[in-house]
């Protein structure tokens, strides 16, 4: 009889911000990317720089059709076919597929629906709806063994659904996009400020902290702050908002890392039991 053994699940934010987003989650035997808004070359180079060279990419989960989340999909699909000797599916909603620019549309697409989990090898992927100004956006919960990770960015407001999906996660990648005072006092034109602040724009530090406070549980082991605006936020302000929320929840032991356009300094390792 085969017993339990331990296998680390690795979470690596490769890029995060308005110039491109991509996150890898895997355990060395299987893995998925969430978004591919930077070039294929950069995705592979940043994985190599984090010690993940040659780790499998068995699927790419696209959140929505904005170029900073899907721009390299067509090229990436072809490159992965060359490297891995097989077609790699790109998972997206029908609305996201319709909205994706023809130059970025991947050749191998699997349509998904919010609330309907699917498997990528032994990885369970659950898409769920977020409020953003595109056709049919989703965020994703990823489960490998006993470890669950959620990657949630590009949403204009906290919702009860999103709060439920964040509960009982071991690690979160959560948008802390802007500081309201910095945004309103900055150089952005008024229409762009209104879009960012709208219910289908991006989360402020205060909104993200509110969402975190309504969903955090003692299971949380790591928090990564994502999609920070370089013009309308600072890593210090975002970190303080998140840290204050976790401390108020009695969880000062949970580390908080800010991911930027160059990703994170090193990947996060989370242990799980696997048969």
Image (tube, rainbow, N blue to C red):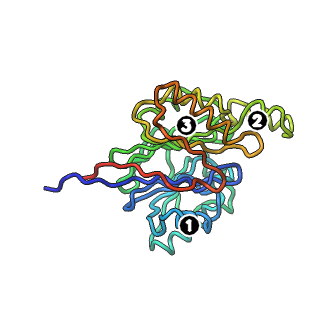
Q: Nearer the viewer, residue 22 or 96?
A: 22
The answer for how far apart the CA atoms under marks 2 and 3 are is 19 Å
Disc 1, SS: helix
Q: Say if 76 sits above or below 253 in the image.
A: below
The residue indicated by pointer 3 is 129
**Dot 1, how many residues are within 10 Å of its Cα: few (below 14), some (14-19), or many (20+)?**
some
Q: Nearer the viewer, mark 2 or mark 3?
A: 2
Of callouts 1 and 2, the N-terminal one: 1
The residue indicated by pointer 2 is 195
Of callouts 3 and 1, the N-terminal one: 1
Q: Nearer the viewer, mark 1 or mark 2?
A: 1
The residue indicated by pointer 1 is 44
Residue 175, label in figure: none
**Dot 3, how many residues are within 10 Å of its Cα: few (below 14), some (14-19), or many (20+)?**
some
| Residue 137 appears anywhere in the view | no
- In the rendered image, residue 104, in percent from the top left (x then y), is placed at 65, 60
Q: Nearer the viewer, residue 6 or 153?
A: 6
The answer for how far apart the CA atoms under marks 3 and 1 are is 29 Å
Q: Report whether 158 appears left or right of 52.
A: right
Give me the residue at 47% from left, 67% from top: 87
Disc 3, SS: strand
Asked if disc 2 and disc 3 are in contact, CB closer than 8 Å, the reply is: no
């Amino acid at each position: 009889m085969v017993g339990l053994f331990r296998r680390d699940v690795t979470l690596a934010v490769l890029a995060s911000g308005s110039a491109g987003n991509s996150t890898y989650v895997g355990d060395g035997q299987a893995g998925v990317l969430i978004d591919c808004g930077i070039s294929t070359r950069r995705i592979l180079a940043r994985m190599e720089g984090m010690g993940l060279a040659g780790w499998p990419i068995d699927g790419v989960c696209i959140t929505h059709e904005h170029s900073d989340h899907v721009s390299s999909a067509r090229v990436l699909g072809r490159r992965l076919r060359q490297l891995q000797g097989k077609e790699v599916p790109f998972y997206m909603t029908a609305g996201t597929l319709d909205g994706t620019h023809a130059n970025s549309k991947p050749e191998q697409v699997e349509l998904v629906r919010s609330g309907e989990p699917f498997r990528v090898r032994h990885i369970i992927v659950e898409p769920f709806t977020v409020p953003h100004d595109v056709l049919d956006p989703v965020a994703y919960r990823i489960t490998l063994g006993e470890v669950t990770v959620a990657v949630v960015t590009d949403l204009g407001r906290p919702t009860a659904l999103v709060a439920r999906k964040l509960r009982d996660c071991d690690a979160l990648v959560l948008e802390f996009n802007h500081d309201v005072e910095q945004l309103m006092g900055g150089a952005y034109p008024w229409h762009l400020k209104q879009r960012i602040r709208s219910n289908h724009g991006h989360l402020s530090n205060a909104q993200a902290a509110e969402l975190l406070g309504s969903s955090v549980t003692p299971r949380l082991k790591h928090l990564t702050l994502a999609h920070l605006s370089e013009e309308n936020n600072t890593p210090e302000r975002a970190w303080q908002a998140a840290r204050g929320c976790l401390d108020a929840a009695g969880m000062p032991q949970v580390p908080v890392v800010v991911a930027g356009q160059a990703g994170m300094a090193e990947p996060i390792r989370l242990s799980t039991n696997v048969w």
